Amino acid sequence: EPEVTQTPSHQVTQMGQEVILRCVPISNHLYFYWYRQILGQKVEFLVSFYNNEISEKSEIFDDQFSVERPDGSNFTLKIRSTKLEDSAMYFCASSASMSASYGYTFGSGTRLTVV
Amino acid sequence: GQQLNQSPQSMFIQEGEDVSMNCTSSSIFNTWLWYKQEPGEGPVLLIALYKAGELTSNGRLTAQFGITRKDSFLNISASIPSDVGIYFCAGPAGGTSYGKLTFGQGTILTVHP
């Protein structure tokens, strides 16, 4: 079964450092997403991306965050200057449909720890 | 924004027992999705509901779309240890946010053998 692949599975970084989280979505999907889950809390929407531009972003997704699809397969989330409160699981997801009604396929996540 | 409230927050049950959990919202949803998250993994879609009153099964799982469109229920029959995980309800945010999902806070299920 096709899957969304995320790397690394765990990243530890110092506060103030830049991190790039990487995702390889399912190959025929056109819609891409990043979600975040702080330990013990619910999954929260960060950003959606289609046709090489952001479709929607949440208030969490401030100027420190950016997304990019640098080639035909990768989808990245960059945090420019990490803060302690950025520590969370970050999930990439992809979908063949614009509508979330059909659900997405999520990756296994990257656990980001900011120290 | 839209909020989904799940209950109970956690459940500790014996293997073989049936489980019931629910999700409520102050606003109407046109789709209800139920996801399961196992430790160290991303959420996996279990069941999708698209019509008020709809009852849908997936093996031992049964979910219902509430008549008011403001709630949904998930039942697991004859639980087994691999049912352990966090169960989330989710729904499309609506309006112009076609692609965005709103998640509940989850129900943590523990099954004792």
Image: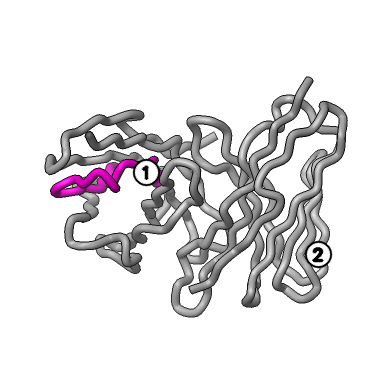
Q: What residue type is labelled 2?
A: Glu
Residue drawn at x 67%, y 31% is: B84
- Residue that badge 2 annotates: B54
Determine crowd level at label 2: few under 14, some 14-19, many 20+ residues with C-alpha closer than 10 A: some
Subunit under mark 2: B
User: Which residue range is magenta in the image?
Assistant: A73-92
Q: Is residue B67 magenta?
A: no
Subunit under mark 1: A
Horizontal and vertical percent for residue B90? Answer: 59, 58
The label shown at residue B82 is none
Judged left or right of residue A2, residue B89 is: right
Judged left or right of residue A10, residue B1 is: right
Q: Quadrant of residue B16?
A: top right
- Residue that badge 1 annotates: A90
Residue drawn at x 49%, y 61% is: A97
Height in image: A90 above or below B1? above
Q: Which amino acid does label 1 sit on?
A: Tyr
Q: Distance between the residues labelled 2 and 1?
A: 33 Å
Horizontal and vertical percent for residue B15? Answer: 82, 26
Q: Which quadrant: the C terminus of chain B?
A: top right
Horizontal and vertical percent for residue B105? Answer: 57, 53
Q: Quadrant of residue B28?
A: bottom right
- CB atoms of marks 2 and 1 within 8 Å: no
Q: Does the magenta stretch include residue A86?
A: yes
